[in-house]
Amino acid sequence: MFVAPKEHVLLHWDFAQGESWIVAYLADEPHMKHSLHNGDMHKDTAAHAIYKVPLEEVTDTMRYMGKQGNHAFTYRMGFKRGAELVNEKSVNPPYVTVTLAEMKTIRTDWLDYYAAIPAWWRSIEDKLGVDRTLITPYGRRRVFFEAWGQELFKQATAHLPQSTLADHANGKLHPKIRVPGGFREIYRQFVVEKAVVKIVNHAHDSCIVECHETCVDDVLD
């Protein structure tokens, strides 16, 4: 979709496991926090939650299943839909398939290991039960009008980290901390003040910019 002009290059950034960081702190989940600060969350999930093996014995396939579990179950996905998604992707490497029984066990073990997540889910339901309103750490307020039930709970659970990450990436100022950052700062510093990049694309938590090849090191730093 995008091609850099002669003597220019495209640079791309995105946040590393941005939603997982937000979930870990909203839920106050100790295992997630430890993995994000000290290791590889997907590998840790495979070792400690799913396969119960030492970290050094985790294979690429095991890590892949840890990653799938983290992406699916954080937002309340059931084991049947989880198995469908894994099997739909099995035509591509690492060619993993899973039975319903296996995925049911994986989900149960995942929830046992990340035990603070179900408590976080319940807190969301409690807030919805008051006035169907959730307020994110950045002060974004949303009222949910869907019928009461699991689909509403899934939407609300996903909304909190996804909305928070988008606001953070855009450079919204936190009402208490008020530290400037995000793509608003990329625009201010590198487009307006230094005029060394052109923003080509910006989506959710990622950004692509175009700059002259002589400026790459400075821009990356």
Image: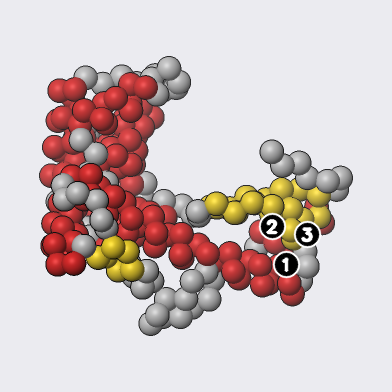
For the residues labelled 1 and 2, the Cα–Cα distance comes to 8 Å
Q: Closer to the camera, 131 or 134?
A: 131
Q: Earlier in the sequence, mark 1 or mark 3?
A: 1
Residue type at mark 2: give it: Ile
Position of residue 133 measured from the top left corner of the image (x, y, whole percent) = 25, 65
Q: Earlier in the sequence, mark 3 or mark 2?
A: 2
Residue 12 seen:
yes
Q: Which residue is mark 2?
A: 199
State the SS at label 2.
strand
Q: Residue at x 66, y 72 (%)?
A: 188
Q: Residue at x 42, y 76 (%)?
A: 174
Label 3 packing within 10 angstroms: few (<14), some (14-19), many (20+): few
Q: Which residue is mark 1?
A: 191
Q: Which residue is mark 3?
A: 215
State the SS at label 3.
helix
Label 2 packing within 10 angstroms: few (<14), some (14-19), many (20+): some
Q: Closer to the camera, 137 or 99?
A: 137
Residue 157 seen:
no
Position of residue 55 measured from the top left corner of the image (x, y, whole percent) = 29, 39
Looking at the rendering, in which quadrant would you find the N terminus?
top right
Q: Find out whether the residues at labels 1 and 2 contact each other: C-beta distance under 8 Å.
A: yes
